[in-house]
Image (cartoon, coloured by chain):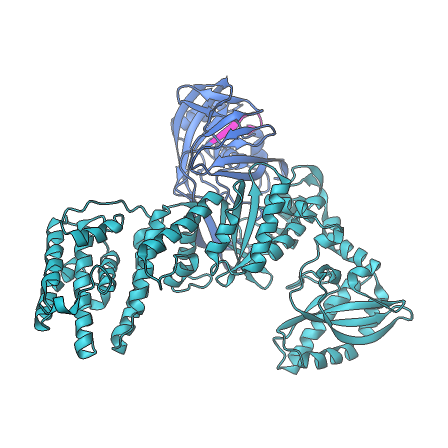
């Protein structure tokens, strides 16, 4: 199996936890839906309306993995929102929890638009502006390559975010901080969640030592990395 | 975080379903309407003592637009002085109570309405003699000569449950629960438990639409019940006061173990009941929290304003190891400083150095960023910290000059700031590295070697010694003249390097004028000069420069810089 690998980074990011509205806190890494949105922006996939999430169907066949390249650092920032839709110009100041200097490595397996995505990434072409969570947090990306992956067996060091499944055994390492995140994994065409999942991410971007895992883990020999899918 | 609260709610579930939705009444006394069932009649109103089994009142918070959820309603007494406003408040409370019975136990609602004038009058009379700031109004049913509190009367209990589930039942659709991930009937009712999840305020979030709430945050009935109970446990047992706001401590385990988690919750409950204020009793609380190794904590700093909840700061996965480190390092720093009146560095102390910032101020944000760094071992800008310290110290020093009296507020503040810097550095918030000592002087070297991470550059030692010498001049001036005119030379503690270096000559002149230039002073002067010569061009900020200088001022009467009178007059 082949995977496309690219890094995405920016100054700030926010992947809002859906249960925080009056003061927004952020997940530590982009959910699968946000990554699909980012890929959609690069490929130029349009939705008919803002309430639609049909673009996700393009990626239904794709497996995605994500790795945090930098320790997750969050800052709180007061932001003034203006409600432009109602026409009242009402301002609301809210406290946003942002990820500072985010950098993630994204891995995508083969899917319908694999070659097109590869072309866009190689040539740094993005049809719509890519961003990390909210439109003002513009993202940059750099292509790492297209690699063959091979299945690997634990014990090993896992570099990506790990989906929590039964029977997993992790060997805790000194100075590691594991953060558990629960988030929507996929949505239907009307943005209704169809699946949720929980993940472990290491706050300081250190690899996890896995002793047992019920899902497949893959190695990318050229990069010396082991990955597992978030879906 | 909500998943963790749901887990707590599930683990601590009460024996009766209705108790998941009952909240705690916090006042000692309340008012009760006495209603006889057969024949149905209003029997008057009395003050009652809040029962130990608080849940019997079937109370839930109905502030804001919420109404008809509970037969026990809040009565605010803040408008007691104005008879008209008080009457209005009572009418509103009574209306909320009537809404509970509306369409259900209708005759009770009707009975209350019939007697409303009389009830209002009686409540008014009773409230005039009550000292509490707020109380509640509940209903007691008399059946077969027995007085039944709301939960003891089955129809009320059933009605309470029905109301608790009403929105979920009316609005539920089939979907996937955001929390358990199962496909079942879900509703958008998380905001009934936590208002920080409200969908009523468009503009708080891009693309937030009330009608989309069911898509964004669907929750099933079982998770909602556990969430509600978890929230109640959180508010009642896992909550601390923190500098005018609330701190919720949410424990969780990496490896599932219900008994262990239960023990932790009970432990926090015990600590929270004994030591309510986190800022004042921080180290004791942290010591208690770091007892269990396998547990991790989420700290949620909440700002509560009426029914509004705002997350000021959310810290995840704080380990007991970190908490233990904070306690131990604070003790070590206190021992190292060896000053009786200087307390251990705590969050409360840092808040004081940041001038007690209140909610929504810029300082509060900076302060909370520091709190984040402390618990999560993240870096914080030393210069920014020094800016706040110097702001506090300068103000105290200004008072010292303007009052022209011996006030050592600035001195103590300097020690506190120094202790805080040592503490923050040792827990990894600052990154001060140890430096070498190149100038030979046994006494001075011993002092600098005690704090190698702070005195890691020659310019710091030079400026510190200049501060010591300036402190000598001030002490001598005060002893001889009961005034300290030399303080005015310090430019409000906003000097640059040239200003500080320039002080050396003036200090020498002054000390000679006062006849106090002895061997020890000479040694300090020569050492300072040697350190200046050795120091490379540095790029320190004015705040850092002046903090080091002020530290010298503060230490000028402490060992090893304390100088005997005999020596001074040599």
Q: Give the range drawn in magenta.
A: A59-66
Residue A136 visible, this angle:
no
Q: In this view, does B118 lie above or below B200?
A: below
Specify the colour of chain B: cyan
Can you tell which quarter of the image residue B84 is in? bottom right
Can you tell which quarter of the image residue B110 is in? bottom right
Q: Which of B285 and A151 is in front in this view?
A: B285
Residue B339 among magenta residues: no
Residue B416: where, in percent of width, then height? 34, 60
Residue A58 falls left or right of residue B387: right
Residue B396 visible, this angle:
yes
Q: Is residue A135 above or below residue B447?
A: above
Can you tell which quarter of the image residue B413 is in? bottom left
In which quadrant will I find the N terminus of chain B? top right
Residue A61 falls left or right of residue B554: right
Q: In this view, does B107 lie above or below B445?
A: below
Q: Residue furthest right?
A: B39
Specify the colour of chain A: blue
In which quadrant will I find the C terminus of chain B? bottom left
Residue B352: where, in percent of width, then height? 39, 63
């Amino acid at each position: 199996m082949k995977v496309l690998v690219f890094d995405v980074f920016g100054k700030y990011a926010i992947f809002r936890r859906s249960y925080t509205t009056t003061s927004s806190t952020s997940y530590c890494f982009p959910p699968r839906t946000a990554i699909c949105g980012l890929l959609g922006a690069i490929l130029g996939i349009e939705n008919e309306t803002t309430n639609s999430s049909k673009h996700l169907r393009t990626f239904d066949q794709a497996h995605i993995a994500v790795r945090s390249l930098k320790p997750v650092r969050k800052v709180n920032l007061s932001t003034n929102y203006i409600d432009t839709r109602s026409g009242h110009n009402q301002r609301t100041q809210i406290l946003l929890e942002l990820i500072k200097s985010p950098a993630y490595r994204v891995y995508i397996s083969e899917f319908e638009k694999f070659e097109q995505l590869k072309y866009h990434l190689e040539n740094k072409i993005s049809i719509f502006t890519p961003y990390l969570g909210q439109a003002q947090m513009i993202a940059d990306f750099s292509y790492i390559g297209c690699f063959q992956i091979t299945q690997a067996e634990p014990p090993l060091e896992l570099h990506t975010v790990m989906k929590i499944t039964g029977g997993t055994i992790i060997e805790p390492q000194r100075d590691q901080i594991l953060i558990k995140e629960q988030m929507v994994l996929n949505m239907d065409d009307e943005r209704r969640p169809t699946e949720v999942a929980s993940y472990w991410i290491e706050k300081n971007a250190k690899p996890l030592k896995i002793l047992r895992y019920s899902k497949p883990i893959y190695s990318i020999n050229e990069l010396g990395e082991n990955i597992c899918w978030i879906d | 975080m909500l998943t963790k609260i749901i887990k707590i709610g599930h683990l601590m579930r009460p024996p009766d379903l209705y108790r998941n939705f009952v909240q705690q009444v916090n006042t000692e006394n309340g008012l009760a309407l006495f209603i006889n069932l057969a024949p149905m009649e209003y029997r008057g109103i009395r003050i009652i003592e809040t029962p130990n089994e608080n849940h019997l009142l079937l109370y839930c918070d109905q502030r804001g637009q919420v109404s008809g959820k509970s037969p026990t309603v809040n009565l605010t007494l803040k408008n007691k002085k104005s008879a008209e406003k008080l009457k209005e408040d009572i009418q509103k409370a009574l209306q909320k109570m009537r809404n509970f019975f509306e369409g259900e136990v209708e005759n009770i609602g009707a009975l209350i309405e019939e007697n409303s004038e009389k009830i209002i009058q009686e409540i008014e009379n009773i409230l005039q003699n009550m000292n509490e700031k707020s109380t509640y109004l509940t209903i007691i049913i008399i059946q077969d000569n027995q007085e039944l509190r709301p939960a003891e009367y089955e129809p009320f209990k059933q009605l309470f449950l029905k109301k608790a589930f009403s929105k979920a039942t009316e609005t539920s659709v089939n979907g996937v629960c955001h929390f358990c991930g199962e496909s079942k009937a879900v509703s958008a009712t998380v905001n009934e438990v936590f208002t920080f999840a409200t969908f009523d305020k468009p503009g708080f979030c891009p693309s937030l639409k009330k009608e989309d709430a069911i898509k964004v945050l669907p929750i099933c009935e079982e998770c909602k019940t556990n969430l509600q109970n978890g929230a109640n446990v959180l508010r009642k047992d896992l909550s601390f006061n923190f500098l005018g706001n609330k701190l919720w401590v949410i424990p969780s385990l990496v490896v599932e173990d219900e008994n262990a988690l239960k023990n932790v919750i009970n432990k926090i409950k015990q600590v929270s009941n004994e030591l309510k204020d986190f800022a004042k009793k921080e180290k004791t609380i942290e010591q208690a929290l770091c007892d269990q190794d396998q547990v991790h904590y989420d700290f949620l700093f909440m700002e509560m304003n009426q029914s509004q909840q705002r997350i000021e700061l959310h810290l995840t996965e704080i380990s007991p190891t970190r908490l233990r480190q904070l306690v131990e390092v604070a003790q070590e720093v206190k021992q190292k400083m060896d000053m009786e009146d200087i307390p251990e560095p705590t969050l409360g102390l840092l808040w004081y150095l940041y001038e007690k910032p209140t909610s929504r101020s810029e300082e509060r944000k900076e302060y909370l960023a520091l709190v984040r760094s402390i618990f999560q071992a993240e870096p914080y800008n030393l210069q920014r910290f020094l800016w706040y310290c110097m702001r506090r110290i300068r103000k105290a020093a200004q008072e010292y000059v303007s009052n022209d009296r011996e006030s050592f507020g600035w001195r103590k503040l300097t020690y506190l700031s120094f202790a805080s810097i040592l503490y923050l550095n040792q827990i990894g918030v600052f990154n001060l590295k140890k430096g070498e000592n190149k100038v030979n002087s046994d006494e001075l070297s011993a002092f600098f070697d005690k704090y190698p991470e702070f005195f890691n550059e020659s310019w710091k030692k030079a400026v510190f010694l200049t501060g010591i010498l300036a402190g000598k001049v001030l002490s001598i001036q005060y002893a001889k003249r009961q005034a300290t005119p030399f303080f005015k030379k310090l430019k409000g503690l906003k000097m640059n390097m040239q200003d500080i270096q320039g002080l050396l000559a003036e200090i020498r002149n002054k000390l000679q004028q006062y006849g106090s230039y002895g061997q020890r002073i000479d040694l300090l002067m020569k050492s300072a000069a040697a350190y200046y010569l050795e120091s490379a061009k540095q790029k320190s900020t004015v705040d850092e420069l002046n903090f080091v200088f002020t530290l010298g001022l503060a230490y000028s009467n402490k060992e090893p810089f304390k100088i005997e009178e005999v020596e001074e007059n040599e």
